[in-house]
Amino acid sequence: MTTIDHHGHAAPLGQLDLRFGSNAVRLGMREWLAVGAVLLVVFVAAPMVWEQVEPLPTAADARVPYRLSNDYWQFGRYAARAAESGQTIVLGDSVVWGEYVAADQTWTACLNRQARGEKFANLGLDGTYPAALAGLVDSYGGAIRNRDVILHCNLLWMATARHDLRDEKAGPLNHPALLPQFLGRIEAYDENSSRRIGIVVSRYVPFMQWTEHLKLAYYDGQDLPTWTMDHPYANPLAAIRPSTVGDDAPPRHEAKPWFEQGIERQDFPWMDLNDSLQWQFFKRTVRTLESRHNRVFVVVGPFNEHMLSADSRAAYRRLAEQAEAWLKDRDIPYFAPEALPSQMYADASHPLAAGYERLAREMLEALPAHW
């Protein structure tokens, strides 16, 4: 059997000069080990090095930018900084984050202003219902140890079977990557096994969390091949601007009372806490925080009772009483403020700036003396 050599001459296959047989690089065992060692160093070191390259915002009232709400690697950095600084950490959903207000008008910003110091850190994330918050604290909040923690309990997530994740037709969920993937079935969450495995692995691999951060922070949530297809003439490296990652956008919604927005009164049926899936996850979050030797203070509500029908308001108050009874039984300090004036709410559970000011004043009076 013959073939054509690099000079264009016929030659037996066994006599060919293999140096010209392929453009591939042939590596021996030592070379492969060296490549593996280099890749391992990059795999481990890249996220740690990037933390030095990309600074966190230094403003007293900094919060995770809305566009990074699914960036749990970045949340972990905020949590670590707050824990290291000795601040009281405030955890919760968009009520803590501040859906209708600027960063300097949030609950924690008002607390800091009234306490005359940078004592409170906003670790709220948009859309973190109790089941998602439990996963966030469990997998990405490990730095929160031996700290004072204020945990917000938003009972809105127990208003209906859909809110409680018991409706199979609930539609797309926020933060599916924070939900249990294999242990404990959630009716509203449907995902294939391959994706579930990838989610679980990423929780333990900082490199994967970091690459997800790069996608969300610099590439509009897209992987690099997709982004380059949408930006064929752009330099991918030029899109990386670490100094802008902490920039906070203006309020996402116009700051108007709920009744000026045309929101109608609601007739939520409300769940019984003994049957509520979200409540089980809320209790899990409390237990996780306590197991890490944090001192936990819970704020229940205040919900906008003004937009509830009479029957729904009565059912809500029974639910709130159940929550308070559990906290009392566990000897967990808590604060259950009265409903704010109607004009201080933007919707069912989000206060406007004046509402946060009032809540902060009342909460500072309710906090235990040693806080």
Image (tube, helix red, strand yellow):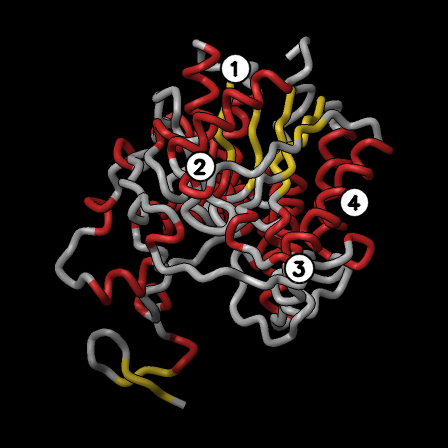
**If you read the primary sequence from the N terminus, does the residue marked by circle 3 or circle 4 appear first?**
3
Q: Amino acid at mark 4?
A: Gln
Viewer-proximal residue among 52 and 114: 114
**If you read the primary sequence from the N terminus, does the residue marked by circle 1 or circle 4 appear first?**
1
Mark sitting on residue 322: 4
Q: Nearer the viewer, mark 3 or mark 4?
A: 3
Q: Nearer the viewer, mark 3 or mark 1?
A: 3
**If you read the primary sequence from the N terminus, does the residue marked by circle 3 or circle 1 appear first?**
1
Mark sitting on residue 46: 2
Q: Disc 3 to disc 4, how far (Cα)?
A: 17 Å
**If you read the primary sequence from the N terminus, does the residue marked by circle 4 or circle 2 appear first?**
2
Q: Is residue 63 left or right of residue 267?
A: left
Q: Disc 1 to disc 4, how far (Cα)?
A: 35 Å
Mark sitting on residue 311: 3
**Residue 168 in the image: above or below residue 335:** below
Q: Amino acid at mark 2?
A: Ala
Neighbour class for label 1 at 10 Å: few (<14), some, many (≥20)? few
Residue 189 can be seen in this image: yes
- Image quarter (top left, top right, bottom left or bottom right) of the C terminus: top right
**Where's residue 2, x and y in %?**
36, 88
* Mark 4–mark 2 CB contact (< 8 Å): no
Tell me the residue at 40%/33% (across/down). 50
Where is mark 1, residue-wise? 85
Q: Nearer the viewer, mark 1 or mark 4?
A: 4
Q: Which quarter of the picture shows residue 166?
A: bottom right
**Where's residue 26, x and y in %?**
43, 58
Neighbour class for label 4 at 10 Å: few (<14), some, many (≥20)? some
Callout 3: SS: helix
